[in-house]
Amino acid sequence: MNSATLYIYNSYSKSKEVFKAINPPFVGMYVCGPTVYNDVHLGNVRTFLTFDIVFRLLTYLGYKVRYVRNITDVGHLVDDADHGEDKIAKKARLEQLEPMEIVQKYTIGFHDVMRLMNIIPPSIEPSASGHIIEQIEMINSIIANGFAYEVNGSIYFDVLKFNEEYPYGKLSGRVLEDLLETTRDLEGQEEKRNKADFALWKKADKNHIMKWNSPWGEGFPGWHLECSAMSTKYLGKVFDIHGGGMDLKFPHHESEIAQNIGACGHAPVNYWMHSNMLNFNSKKMSKSEGNSILPMEMVSGEHPLLDKGYSPMTLRFLFLQSHYSSEIDISIKSLQDAEKGLKKIMNALSYLSKIKWKQGLIHPETVSDIIKLNTEIITHLCDDFNTAKAIADLYAMATYINTWYHQKQEVSEIPKDIFENLHKIYSEIVSDVLGLKEEKGADNNTLDAAMNLIIELRQQAREEKKWSVSDQIRDTLKAAGIIIKDSKDGQSTYEIEN
RNA sequence: GGUCGGUUGGCCGAGUGGCUAGGCAGAGCUCUGCAAAAGCUUGUACGGCGGUUCGAAUCCGCCAUCGACCUCCA
């Protein structure tokens, strides 16, 4: 185990706390996954990226993490809380497919995007429809404890009753009285005793496709219930970290807490983490706003807002340049900046393995600076996953690496072990913790072979000082979107403009 | 209307009560047959008004402004 102290901002206590695992080295982490009724958009990706970093850093620090991220494939209603059509069912109707075909289609799409973004799969990815029994059992416990009631085959959580014994609304900073006043009048709520109550189980009508047998007749589970049931099943009644997007704080996470307490009498989670929103034109990117960009559109550049495609790693890097708790406003400029910045970091990574250590005159200032960087970068990451600061450290390291590489491809002013440590930390942080990987522009062997020949011929022309030939090759290729880059050591490479 | 969170140099974006992250752009330089690329160096800042303090971008108050949540959303 790494000895670094990890601090996490706990949204429940609203303060930064030292992370203490319940049962080290094991850590249980639950993150609310997508409702698979549509393509995941870029905003969703940000959230999963945030917790990818949490997962990766915990693992890097030596924790054994059981990471559970669900797939919501039932129970998430379209219109109002506890009313309206099931999202999956609606989409199924629109696309004329079986609901599970919708689920399958968008689950695969979701996984494709996660892979593209180099986001590590969770340890367990349970689906709501696969845990109906667990959900029914949990409802039974809640009823037995007196926090839920049945009306016409539906079960509702009694928020007022719950609030008499436990604070409802602490996570999201809500006061129950306000909720009772401000909650809009919605259709289909007449069954509830109070507006703030929410459904644990909804009775299904005849036409409803996705329904299951229960002690209360045919029906389906409420949206919030699945996360309570599945986190309990796989992580226990109390676990370490629960994550999700800010917009899930209320009502989803608030209800989750109430359900868990209602079922077993104590709070389920030690550290609540919420990642902030991704903005687009200063507006939250959301499905309901209709201003969402799909990850695939981002990569292909096929979107009115975009000037060209931006690679998955560029996106990943852009997100990591700001703290997960800050909003990000995406723009062409920020994408371009990220593209250049990422290149710098990745270039230095590739230089690193070409630099040889050599015995020489030690430069004390450089030594102490690098020792400082080597430790600071971990400290920064452990400070509530401050990837922005860690990236600043990487830039500082990269400046050293670049200088060594461009001077002699060797380093002699620091001791061998410190250089090796720098090498190890730089590559581990870049690859393992931040999850940045090299992207090949053209993954095409045929083109590679042809280009290598052209580059070689041009090189010959240059050696013979036939500048008109070498320039013609360069200019013609440029017009075709291929850029030749000459480096100092005489080697040339090519890159495809997109 | 209620609750919460922002407001940092040309742009993006971190941040601790005193030692002014970082990136992009700009400027200078190195390399280069030329160019591109790459690299090195470098300036400018903390929404407004008060207060606390020896000292505040950092703490407090007021104002302005933007946004989020209060309804499905990561």
Image (cartoon, coloured by chain):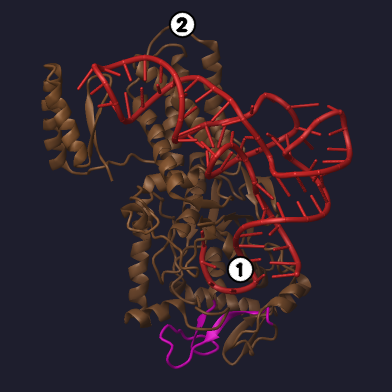
Chain colours: A brown, B red
The quadrant in which residue A126 appears is bottom left
Q: Residues within 10 Å of mark 1 (few under 14, many from 20)?
A: many
Amino acid type, residue under disc 2 in the picture? Leu
Say what secondary structure mark 1 lies in.
helix
Q: Is residue A198 magenta?
A: yes
Residue A256 circle label: 1
- Placement of A410 over or under A246, stated as above or below: above
Quarter of the figure with residue A423: top left
**Does residue A1 show up?**
no
Residue at 37% over, 72% down: A103
Q: CA distance from mark 2 to mark 1?
A: 61 Å
**Magenta segment range?**
A195-222
| Residue designated by label 2 | A361
Snapshot quadrant of residue A6? top right
Q: Circle 2 marks a residue in which chain?
A: A
On whether residue A399 falls in the magenta region, the answer is: no
Quadrant location of the N terminus of chain A? top right
Chain letter of mark 1 equals A
Give residue A26's mark.
Answer: none
Residue drawn at point x = 63 percent, y = 62 percent: A268
Mark yes or no: residue A36 visible: yes
